[in-house]
Image (tube, rainbow, N blue to C red):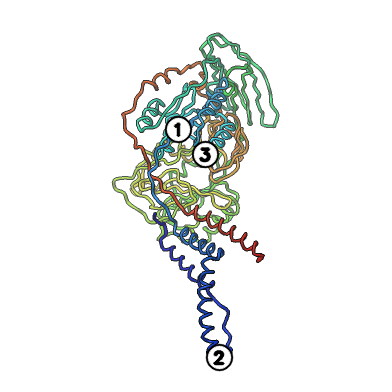
Amino acid sequence: MAFTTPLALAALASIIPLIILYLLYPKPLDIQIPSLMFLMKVEEEKKRLYSSITRLIKDPLFLLQLLVLIFLSVAAAGPFFITEEPLSGEHTVLIIDSSASMQADERFKSAVSIAQNYVSKKNSIILAKNIPVIALQDAGASSAKDVLEKLQPTATVADLSMAISSGMRLLSDEGGRIIVISDFTNWDGDDPVTAKSLAESYGLKMTFVKVGKSAGNVGIINGWLEASDTGYTYNCIIKNYNDRSEKAKIDISISNGDNDAVSRTMSLDIAARSTKQFMLTNIGNGITTVKLANTDDMMVDNTAYISIPGVSQQRVLFVSDTGKLPSKTSLSLIPNTGTTTSGNVPSDIARYDVVVIANKNTALSKQEISILDKFINKNGGKVVFIASNALAPDVADFDLFKLLPVKPLEITEASDGVLLSVVQDTRLTEDMKFDEVAVYKYLNATPRSDSTSLVVAENNIPVLTYQAMGDGTVVYIGLNDVLGEEAWGNFHNLPEYPVFWAKLIGWLGGAGDISDYNIKAGAITALSQSMDYSAPGGTMSGNRVLYDEVGIYEVAGKRIAVNLYNDRESDTTVDASDVIERSLSKTGPGVVRATTYTVKKDIDIYLIAGVLLLMLLEIMIIRKRGEL
């Protein structure tokens, strides 16, 4: 047996005062007695001493209190022992496909029912979506069955291979088995059969269970918006997966932006295994719904939602000590955005939606910093800081660092260039080729603990970082856009640069491109701060939104339409029996897995339980003596 904190054993010295306490006698009295009586008294005192020691040893309260002190002292030292446990194989990881196709013909319900039969003594449950979600970990049979009853399918495409990898990590110590229940019609990522072979090569038991059969479906597989002078035009594609022609009845509800809606119905004859396209023109602001009235085996792709936001003018203040800058030019190109240029931070910035600080050499004054502080923390303002010499620690005022989501260290030269990488995929980084950006000079900094970095350079130096501060949001861009020989990099020369600014201002100002309001299921968006938002399934909270349901999300005042739009996921006629056949013929490399694993077992919990029992017994003895 070993101890985590051996010095805690010094607490055993508390036994000494306990023994002394029980050996104490009342203070002796001075009495005049004859010599003979004195000798007899001494002999009597010796007998009393021996009698006291005997009573001390036999006194149950003393023994109980002695054990309590010993148990507490040893427990404080953290006793434990190391043992080799056999791989039990009792841990079962249930991976359930939660993709959109599992909503067809009650496949998901069948998957849950099958999973109930595989529940064992110890269970973990993983929902296979585009990002695997661990719904339960290391729990008993009762908890597993309770969780299974509450699971619901989503509208994403499952990454089965990634889900299997997550299951392998859960079983990496003690071994066990993985049960994958899916229709195996479509997936993201690697082939799940390859992932199964890898898991089996490490000694894990893998089982693929197929659910569902070929079913009929007519669904909306694509849709996009095109802007025109008179509004937006919606293009919709409907596909008939059946072996016979179908007459699709389409109910259309078009909002005009005044809480009123215009409804109409149309029909399309769609030949077997073919598609039909139609258009809706002059769509007004608000939510428009296109719904197939036909009933089939998969309803999740029978409805498409269209969100057209109201046009609002974004007011941007651009503060800079330099005249011509690519960032300023990019801001002027953003539709419905009015940009005001200033050489300093004015006192009336509360009327602006976003403030961009682009000073290259001139540090902000204390008064300007105070104005920005109030604008961010009190007025809920949005401020963007662009890295430059003006933010260097030897130039900037110390109070400015309290407003930045990063801690600047120094300006660093990199003659060979520094490459960038995206660490969080969001709407801000989508379609942005940061891997093509070369940086030759940068502001070396570290991110604050409560900030979020989306793009970093080598050594995790923050390049695109934001932080919720008070009621507002602060964004740091580590890519200076100064021109000429003093240029820090080449980002401002890339065609994506104006697009980046449009995305950023739209995200901060609550507006954005029309594509930000109409997205495919499975997309992820980072929020400027943790907040409540409305999803089709109810109210949720967080600083990231996973759009995994078809319907309307309300996030930060924006109504976002989410649609499936996936041809392969809507194809319910795929049988996928070949996946099961391939999985049975695959064998792993034959790596031999160990038969035991090392376990550290703590003893302190048992000692504490013993203390509680001893204290209970002590109370019972005192009560029996009539002393309580």
Res 301 → quadrant: top right
Residue that mark 3 sits on = 139
Count of numbered circles in the view: 3
Give the Cα separation between the discs numbered 2 and 3.
80 Å
| Disc 1 packing (10 Å; few <14; some 14–19; many ≥20) | many
Q: Position of residue 296 (x, y in %)?
A: 59, 17
Evaluate whether residue 542 shows in this view: yes
Whether label 2 touches label 1, CB < 8 Å: no
Discs 2/3, front: 2
| Disc 2 packing (10 Å; few <14; some 14–19; many ≥20) | few
Res 589 → quadrant: top left
Give the Cα separation between the discs numbered 2 and 1.
96 Å
**Residue found at the far right of this picture:** 260
Residue that mark 2 sits on = 34
Q: Position of residue 598 (x, y in %)?
A: 38, 44
| Disc 3 packing (10 Å; few <14; some 14–19; many ≥20) | some
Q: Residue at x 42, y 53 (%)?
A: 80
Q: Quadrant of the N terminus?
A: bottom left
SS class, disc 3: strand
Residue that mark 1 sits on = 163
